[in-house]
Amino acid sequence: MSRDGGADAPGVDPQQLWLASGGPRRGRKPAYSREAITAAAVALADAEGLEAVTMRKVAARVGAGVMSLYSYAPDKETLLNLMVDHVSGELPVTDPPTGDWRADLKTIARLQRAHMLRHPWLPAALAGRRSPGPNTLAFLERALAALRPTRLDGTAKLEIFAQLTAFVAGHVAHELAQATAAQSPDRAAAEARYLAAVAADGHHPELAEALSAPARPLTPEATFTRFLNRLVDGLDTD
């Protein structure tokens, strides 16, 4: 398949990707930089979605021949790693922990949510295994520092950060889908009528009871906060 990220795209060597030079090793002085190419790919994803990011389209954005880009990113998997780390540089990493690790984790989650809403392609990009670059590792360092007051070992701390990130990514993906669905009020009304009919059929008493409960605030921020509180407040630190 194609070098734009098909099934036979090679895996990413993290040392080669992050610790080696970002440009071609031999030949004349490169006309482009890996940073510029990555920024062009990010702008393309922000504007058109992750599916639109191909080496050909990125090359057109920077005014390069598509083959020349393979010296910087040999396949789409490498390019996605570069993109994820590039935008991770927007996340603040210098704020010291407060000592209240649950509050600090919630702050980190809110930062992640805002970050993913700015770059709606990120939840999908994070779904596959990625090799963390320097910006990603700097934010991970902040999260690990926040967890220092707990009794957790290193593996558990890493798992909690992964769990938190997966929660935020999944929630943002759902949030974006809901926002799209809200643009079709007729569909939303039809779904509400369907659930009401199912709840009234006598075969789903638990659903009927759940739907009869007092409504809670349904703003995106309020919903995210409720879900986040349940996750973080319920973490076991033993």
Image (cartoon, rainbow, N blue to C red):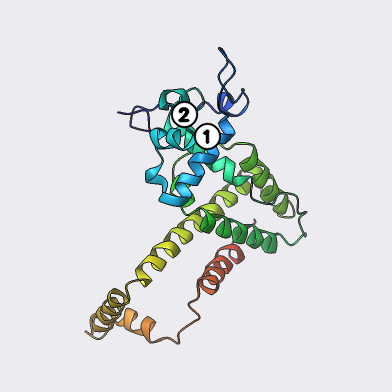
- Which class describes the residues within 10 Å of circle 2: few (<14), some (14-19), or many (20+)? some
Q: x and y percent of residue 73 in the render?
A: 49, 28
Left or right for 144, reference 164: right
Of residues 51 and 58, the one drawn nearer to the viewer in this rendering: 58
Q: Quadrant of the C terminus?
A: bottom right
Q: Is residue 118 above or below residue 196?
A: above
Q: Determine which residue is flagged by label 1.
A: 37
Q: Extreme top residue here? A: 27
Query: Mark on residue 64?
Result: 2
Residue plotted at (23% across, 83% down): 197
- Which class describes the residues within 10 Å of circle 1: few (<14), some (14-19), or many (20+)? many
Q: x and y percent of residue 206 in the render?
A: 33, 80
Left or right for 177, reference 85: left
Do the numbered discs 1 and 2 sit on residues whose CB atoms are within 8 Å? yes
Q: Give how far apart the Cα atoms at labels 1 and 2 are.
A: 10 Å
Is residue 165 at least partly visible in the picture?
yes
Amino acid type at image mark 1: Ile
